[in-house]
Amino acid sequence: MTYFNNIKKIAYEGPNSTNPFSFKYYNREEKINGRSMEEFMRFAVSYWHTFTGEGTDPFGQGTMVRPYNNLTGIDLAKARVEASFEFFEKLDVPYFCFHDFDVAPESDSLSETFKNLDVIVPMIKEYMKTSKTKLLWNTANMFSHPRWVHGAATAPNADVYAYAAAKVKKGLEVGKELGSENYVFWGGREGYETLLNTDMKLELDNLARFFHMAKDYAREIGFDAQFLIEPKPQEPTKHQYDFDVATGLAFLQQYDLQDTFKFNIEANHATLAGHTFEHELHVARINGMLGSVDANQGDMLIGWDTDEFPTDLYSTTLAMYEIIKNDGLGSGGLNFDAKVRRGSFDSDDLFYAHIAGMDAFAIGTKVAQRMLEDKVLEDFVADRYSSFREGIGLDILEGKADFHKLEKYALELDVVKSNKSGRQEHLKAILNKYLLETISEK
Amino acid sequence: MTYFNNIKKIAYEGPNSTNPFSFKYYNREEKINGRSMEEFMRFAVSYWHTFTGEGTDPFGQGTMVRPYNNLTGIDLAKARVEASFEFFEKLDVPYFCFHDFDVAPESDSLSETFKNLDVIVPMIKEYMKTSKTKLLWNTANMFSHPRWVHGAATAPNADVYAYAAAKVKKGLEVGKELGSENYVFWGGREGYETLLNTDMKLELDNLARFFHMAKDYAREIGFDAQFLIEPKPQEPTKHQYDFDVATGLAFLQQYDLQDTFKFNIEANHATLAGHTFEHELHVARINGMLGSVDANQGDMLIGWDTDEFPTDLYSTTLAMYEIIKNDGLGSGGLNFDAKVRRGSFDSDDLFYAHIAGMDAFAIGTKVAQRMLEDKVLEDFVADRYSSFREGIGLDILEGKADFHKLEKYALELDVVKSNKSGRQEHLKAILNKYLLETISEK
Amino acid sequence: MTYFNNIKKIAYEGPNSTNPFSFKYYNREEKINGRSMEEFMRFAVSYWHTFTGEGTDPFGQGTMVRPYNNLTGIDLAKARVEASFEFFEKLDVPYFCFHDFDVAPESDSLSETFKNLDVIVPMIKEYMKTSKTKLLWNTANMFSHPRWVHGAATAPNADVYAYAAAKVKKGLEVGKELGSENYVFWGGREGYETLLNTDMKLELDNLARFFHMAKDYAREIGFDAQFLIEPKPQEPTKHQYDFDVATGLAFLQQYDLQDTFKFNIEANHATLAGHTFEHELHVARINGMLGSVDANQGDMLIGWDTDEFPTDLYSTTLAMYEIIKNDGLGSGGLNFDAKVRRGSFDSDDLFYAHIAGMDAFAIGTKVAQRMLEDKVLEDFVADRYSSFREGIGLDILEGKADFHKLEKYALELDVVKSNKSGRQEHLKAILNKYLLETISEK
Amino acid sequence: MTYFNNIKKIAYEGPNSTNPFSFKYYNREEKINGRSMEEFMRFAVSYWHTFTGEGTDPFGQGTMVRPYNNLTGIDLAKARVEASFEFFEKLDVPYFCFHDFDVAPESDSLSETFKNLDVIVPMIKEYMKTSKTKLLWNTANMFSHPRWVHGAATAPNADVYAYAAAKVKKGLEVGKELGSENYVFWGGREGYETLLNTDMKLELDNLARFFHMAKDYAREIGFDAQFLIEPKPQEPTKHQYDFDVATGLAFLQQYDLQDTFKFNIEANHATLAGHTFEHELHVARINGMLGSVDANQGDMLIGWDTDEFPTDLYSTTLAMYEIIKNDGLGSGGLNFDAKVRRGSFDSDDLFYAHIAGMDAFAIGTKVAQRMLEDKVLEDFVADRYSSFREGIGLDILEGKADFHKLEKYALELDVVKSNKSGRQEHLKAILNKYLLETISEK
Ligand SMILES: [Co+2]
Ligand SMILES: [Co+2]
Ligand SMILES: [Co+2]
Ligand SMILES: [Co+2]
Ligand SMILES: [Co+2]
Ligand SMILES: [Co+2]
Ligand SMILES: [Co+2]
Ligand SMILES: [Co+2]
């Protein structure tokens, strides 16, 4: 059966099209700097928000009107698989992502949960044979079931820890089975509610042990996906251990895991941690740790994770700027970890929202690429730091300076007269010009 | 001359005293767990807020009524030194802290600035000979003068970098001269205003080079003070590189500086970074990096650094809890990086405020000590994690588990039934009881 | 049957009791300023958090272990009524509060929903006959069911508006039937998600019409409960119309409703709106609009409504200070709109949490009462504003001044020399002293 | 003499111009819907940020390099007047705004302060004779001098209150003298630092008395400027009484001042209060209280007022959308209450920044106008609320419904089936399309 009967394959029709079910800017095959848009952006649909999500919030029940709302249990799970591949095809996206819990029902019993997975995973594999859509990453949900109430790999309970290991073991096997290009760890409950009852040191040690075991097992079964940590500062826990990229980096270095992991960076998690999206991408990039992206946006006046579809063109432009400077995302991609608003409850809204997000990133990619080609920021930066390419500046960079030499230089100088304006306002005007003119010059 | 004529030496008079210029709870010589309160808390007065600060804010001029307001330049600087030692003596504190800029006027000219220091530092040294008050730490102000507009050790200008090196070189010499027990780096402008004009990688590399040079020079001159980084997420910069302890830890590890530094943790900086004060202390403690404390408090509804005197007893208790678990602060102390409100403009308020802060920490120390003696939280935590002291839990801790073994265990278990309540509400009630009853049992 | 078998009636046993199931400070019959603690605080249990809440959060399923977890539908509803009255009796509280939806299952069908209420409400009434516990307020849940997705009395859909009217009509009838002393309006979805699709003016006009109709109907049926608006800035909506007390006040004045309503003020809603709890109480009080209180607390580092049980003694003290100055809450009370943490999943935690909250308010009441009796703040304030009790100040207050007279006065004065310190730090130290000493003097 | 010698009059040169000192989008005489851009936007330069501001921040001294930096006192004030009119002419703006304190030095002595004004105001008047640039509004600075430490019209000191009256009296006279079209009240210190020492009721009563006296005096001297209140939630005070538009509205209604005042809405103040800029404009508009605009933007990750130049095109578009729906700002305008970053210290940056802001609003105006002409949102909204134009919905609007009628209707309906998707994601995509395509179609 089909689920989204009124929707045809979404095609690029250009900005003047009046068809709301068309791409206005995302033109899959159009080349940007030698790569097709599809290769460039590597979009993924997130299974949880798009097929499993019901539109609940802390004060309300589900609102989503879905063609499989009448089903339950394994039947519902199967219908969602069918619907998802129809959706992938109509949207023509190259990737999808899922948690085990999204695709197959989880029960109190581990064996039963595994059985459900053993029904659904082969079904997904079968669909993938005839679909272009591949698995960007999979992961294990270790935050929804009540057993994770105090954490999973950082639980104060060894039973829970073992249970988590079993789930991730299965997740790695599923990832290998479906050819997943990455495997994600988001530690939604790996943190604390109150320090009054917490042994943080033990929990962090255990978490590191867990990651080492995961790495060993992946190697054992020949699953060579990139491991990714997805930082988030809080929610659901009061304080999550992988607060942001820098915190993750400290942890990975301490426990000798920095070569095993990269980061999966979510825009809304960045802003909840007090950073811009581009800041987190930047920090990961200059440390060689930029792995993949959860493409969404938050509401800056709201203190929780709203996971909105990304439509802010400043954000998509500055994100793509970092990604292009990173020479792309490697095995990563742009996963829409984004949900339609609770009031956008029609299935049509799923298409509208993905179109909005894909168009927004297509625009951002073009603008960022043009800015990089014109070196409009790069040249400004090079000039700004030029004093480090000669004289005392070069000495500093080459390790030929010490405090004696620098003091001598400074005393001769005595007064600093060489500071130059940072030109922030002008650079922002240039960004606006590129935003408006790159597209209009199409 | 004397400056605070109406004030006598502040003495402990107990809670029933009606003398506002007395300690109600801080009893300098009273022993807690074998150490006097003075040794335990190692209070320091911060020179900048107490003697240099004028009560300006972004919308207003100074309001502080000080006995030396009629002076300027080096005369003002000298009067402040005199006043400060009178203040230290009347408050009977063991330590003080300063930036170079606080004690001696800074000019555009480096040589002139050094000359001013060379007048004031010997004067301070002379006063210290007859004073009990020692130097907890000194530092170089590299954020107030316009030359630091784009940073100091992370400036895009090599001249500025050299200038910063000269200032820190001098600072290390001054620290040695005055017997400072620590040397602090707070990078108020070591960050960025906008990524559009910033080469973050170069700036961080330069910062690390700077720290290595500082370390080398301190060793060269035999200055063995503990180096401290004071994290802050932002303000004055839009984004500061030493965002919080975890970020600092990542940086120090990357650049092989983790053995050279510890952290100076400020309560208000913690909360601005989205953490509690005790969280930052805890993270530093379990990493062996808890060096010293800037004891103040913020207003949780205000988005900037208010540097209020610490009076919240929950905060002082939970901070002292971490500090006692750390077996004290070593060469560090509790420095009041706190300023009287702009409306508390009398010199009397300087005494009121320090008394309020010292009493609040005296109370917090007693309550924390009692809680630790009674093991009221420690026992709860030990029990909560007891599953890691035997069986599969012990295997995990001892590195004897892998995903095969854990999965086998989990499948045999099949359903998790061993989770226990975290009891957060009850633990908070216990904290209240200790807060109220520890003191009343005096 | 009984539900909380291991719990006996919670008694006052004083701070030295080692029985965790006892009040340490709340002594029901103890008189404070002539009124018993019970009369003073008028505690209420909130039905939704305590009996209906399951411990779900946006990332997790329910965790609460409750004796009626095996039931569903109307059987579950009945069991909860039984359990609730057992709980009220064991806790010995004078009041409870509920939404229609908490006590009786809501279905898509209005008539069916009413039928369910018609089963449960008489059952509650029957229980109330033999219970001391009365109904502080009831309300209609118009935010959980998907029909309210775009609002209730501010919905863009007249059908929904009519449905909301029917629900509130029923709510008023139920309130009258059960002798409710207040009726609450919390407009969880009365706001907007985006201005792009919103006619705010029409929505506000409709809301005012709705309130007038509610007032008319209550008068018609002789239900003389106090109407209360409970402000909240956001969540679940992006922006809620009753943002805070001031916003509510503007609305009520505009639509001639200021005599019909007072405010039900929740601590956590206050802080989410950028105010302290005591600020909101104060603003309501000086406008004669302080009706009732949702007694809880938020986590100041978390951007959503955590509805924690109130344990912060500063907060309970400063809240009670306002309430005592208001000469109590009239028909209002202190309703624990608070939920045990998701990790505090035992039924025992329900008792621990309420005990913690009741003890915290008992302490706060005593401290506030003592501070008022000693006039320690009142005298300071009176002195601070004393210039308005004579001369030009009195002229200003009595309307005898204009700009001519004031300019003449100011020019004669020419320089202001009469400002006095605000003494904030000293006042905070005094607050600490009262907090610690009031209780120890028991 | 001239001050900005290297700058010629800034002309519109279109987006393809490579001259950084040209408008790319703001074309003064170009008509939008029959009005020239100049008339439409009514830009004003704020004297304080542009001529008086020195680039200080709480941690740093001034950085601004200005041609009059060598002067002091009244000479400096005069040079600034000269420079400002040169700047106005080169930028070709129709308006400017100032506080008394910006244009003339303020001393401790009121008479001396008045004398300074009496030198500068005639000089400004003389310049205005030959300049096209008029005075949008003036105001009295009652927050910078230490005398305002506890407030001005809400001070606890009657002397200060009288002093404030004298200042505003003078301000009204100056406004009349210079033909100001509005008079602004921003109560930077009209609020409190702590409730512990505050009589809020007395302060608010006094504030209202003050406003009535101001109104009376303006009428007396025939100064018919529009009075404007500029809300801000906090900073410099911990809590400011005019928190936001709604709070201001409550106050104005309570004290019968709603016909005397409109609001001057600042973008950055809106976001600090937890609202979007367009929200505040919207609330003022639907209440007939939208008077003028302080056009700037904040950094959403920063908790203080950054007063950045407005460059965010979403913000300028949505702001202009409200302003156009308001049929313009009447006697108000778009005042750049914005400062160049501390690192943008060249005089050139003053031009870059104003160009960036003016271009951003020109773009926003065009996009908003086009969206309104196409009724792309208006039609969606009309359809969304269409149920209120017939049947039961119309009854509700016309006051023909009561709870009986609505309950009857709802029971017949029994189940709500008529909700429609809010389409937020699609509407945001439409906004993006208008943003990009409006300009490219030029
Ligand atoms: Co994500
Ligand atoms: Co998210
Ligand atoms: Co500090
Ligand atoms: Co600070
Ligand atoms: Co509530
Ligand atoms: Co709440
Ligand atoms: Co403004
Ligand atoms: Co501002």
Image (cartoon, coloured by chain):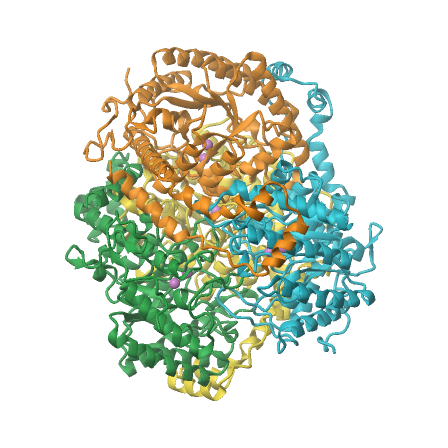
Chain colours: A green, B yellow, C cyan, D orange
The residue depicted at 60 percent of the width and 49 percent of the height is: B311
Q: Residue A199 at what x, y percent from top left?
A: 51, 70
Pick the residue in front: C440 or B424.
B424
Q: For the N terminus of chain A, give its image quadrant.
A: bottom left
Compared to B300, does C395 lie above or below? above
Residue furthest left in the image: A34
Q: Is residue C183 visible?
A: yes
Task: Name the foreground residue: A425 vs C230.
Answer: C230
**Residue D89 in the image: above or below residue C34:** above
Q: Quadrant of residue C298?
A: bottom right
Q: Judge by depth and name the residue closer to the eye, A392 or A283.
A: A283
Where residue B305 sits in the image (x, y, percent)?
48, 45
Residue A392 position in % (x across, y down):
20, 45
Name the outermost residue toward the right. C34
Report if residue B29 is visible in the image. Answer: no
Residue C376 appears at what percent x and percent y? 73, 42
